[in-house]
Amino acid sequence: MYSEPRLRPVSLNAAAQAACASLPLAPALPALRVGMIGLGTVGMGTWSVLQRNQSLIAARAGRGIELVALAVRDRVRAAEKLGDAALGNVELTSDPHYVATHPDIDVLVEVAGGTGPAHDWVQAALAAGKHVVTANKALLATHGEALAASAATHGRQLAYEAAVAGSIPIIKTLREALAANRIDAVAGILNGTSNYILTRMRDAGLDFEQALAEAQALGYAEADPTFDVDGIDAAHKLTLLAANAFGVPVNFDAVHVEGIRDLQRADIAAAAELGYAVKLLAVARRRGNALELRVHPALVDQRNPLAHIHGATNGVSVHGDASGAAFYSGAGAGGEPTASAVVADLIDLARLPVDNVRGRGHGVPTLGTHVREGDAPHVLPMAEVVASQMLCVACDKGLCESGTVRALERSGLQVLRRKWVHAGEQGAAPALVLLTAPVADAVAGRAVQQLQAHGGPIVRRLRVHAEG
Ligand SMILES: NC(=O)c1ccc[n+]([C@@H]2O[C@H](COP(=O)([O-])OP(=O)(O)OC[C@H]3O[C@@H](n4cnc5c(N)ncnc54)[C@H](O)[C@@H]3O)[C@@H](O)[C@H]2O)c1
Ligand SMILES: N[C@@H](CCO)C(=O)O
């Protein structure tokens, strides 16, 4: 339950106080009091948005939103960064647990990251009766079920719009706007860093490491960027989308995960020759009673809007049985785009009735459903996922074409298109690029292995994304 109205002055600026005073419906509501852990890219973005838009946020929330306590690693540096005047009454500490359980806060904002201490802080905050807003998808993908249960037990909200697709309100869209639908498929570019890298490799000819360094400098990458480039971050996000779209438990281990580390500029160029963009795609899709749950590089047809998502932008397509197809895009990473979602969650919390009854069990469920269906779809093994394949075969023009195609066909692949493409570095030999009919992943993998065996040509394989 929110605490009773307080008489102590809040450190809202004059405009915010005026906005609150002129609210006809909620003139006497106390400010929503916030404790925050972390003042990095997202923490700083949240600070800036709360400061800059204070009065319009108060007007929309129906009351002020006041930062009361802030945990940082280095208090002196933080005080210098924020300035004494702006800090006002905000209590600066290096003790996150103190902030999580601070008696004067209603909400904990966790934007420090990680899955160890952050788990303890969030649990402690919920147990102490605080709502929690977090951008931490790694935490939720690993402990989401337990944390959601804890939030329900304590009658508190665990809000995480910022954890998936940056500024795009995709959690709210699936959980609320599309709640009437049976969702058939969700496919998205969910990692800004890897999409930025792919874009810079293609457009500026940067190599992988240069493009990654740029993404890090721009504040897009995770503290451990292997999470970005190895598909792990996108898989964390996909688990949250799948829970909300399909009512399945959050289960990171069930996702098939591949990243972009091994992609070559030649793959991107070969795909372009066939009319495709290469994207790191996260897909959750019904197949009968099963669910595909996978993250891997994929060829996306140029007619699909996902092919035109560049830089750190994210895009998500959703197909619902009633809504039909919808597409959402926006900034997927960075301080203020992510803060936009953090602060929107705070505004939602500020709008809750002040006498919100603890543990009532109604309202918006953390993971999209109050009741899990007994027949929730099981996850389809990657080996059984069916997709067309692009194969780039490094072999001698004129010598290998028909032999390669015959060998692949003996292994169960049907070649639909073939083209010799100059896709490698300047002066490199052309590669034979083949497009196959849809085939089970295990069959495609075996066919490539057999072709490469006994000194055969090197074959690079990429799956083609099929809509629907
Ligand atoms: N950067 C983005 O674009 C983005 C977008 C969406 C979600 N996220 C998520 O938001 C969270 C924060 O990301 P970020 O990019 O701001 O990271 P960051 O590394 O820039 O900032 C994290 C901050 O938390 C602080 N911190 C860590 N442990 C602390 C402790 N024990 N006490 C006090 N301070 C502590 C660090 O010193 C750092 O300043 C992560 O969970 C990340 O996955 C980031
Ligand atoms: N590292 C993440 C941040 C946003 O979640 C990304 O690049 O998408």
Image (tube, helix red, strand yellow):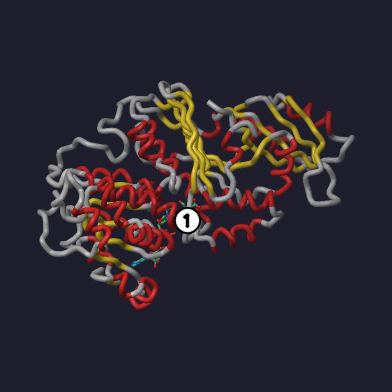
Residue type at mark 1?
Answer: Gly
Q: How far across and how far down the image is residue 94, in percent?
A: 30, 71
Q: Quadrant of residue 270?
A: top right
| Residue at the bottom extreme, as displayed | 76
Q: Is residue 333 visible?
A: yes
Q: Quadrant of residue 128?
A: bottom left
The answer to whether residue 351 is above or below residue 70 is above
**Within 8 Å of ligand 1, the CB of disc 1?**
yes
Image height check: is 28 above or below 376?
A: below
Going 13% across and 52% down the picture, which residue do you hit? 28
| Residue 402 screen position, x and y as percent | 83, 29
Quarter of the image where ligand 1 sits: bottom left
* Residue in the image at 26% along x and 52% along y: 58
Residue closer to the observer: 426 or 448: 426
Numbered disc total: 1
Q: Is residue 352 above or below residue 11?
A: above
Q: Is residue 124 visible?
A: no
180 left or right of 447? left
Relative image position of residue 82 (x, y in whole percent): 36, 71
Residue corresponding to mark 1: 334
From the viewer's perspective, is 104 left or right of 332?
left
Q: Residue furthest right?
A: 398
Question: Callout 1: 10 Å neighbours few (<14), some, many (20+)?
Answer: many
State the residue in front, 251 or 154.
Answer: 154
Residue at screen point 30% across, 70% down: 87
What kind of element bears circle 1? loop
Relative image position of residue 226 (x, y in whole percent): 53, 56
Using the image, determine if residue 3 lies above or below residue 275.
below
141 to the left or right of 257: left
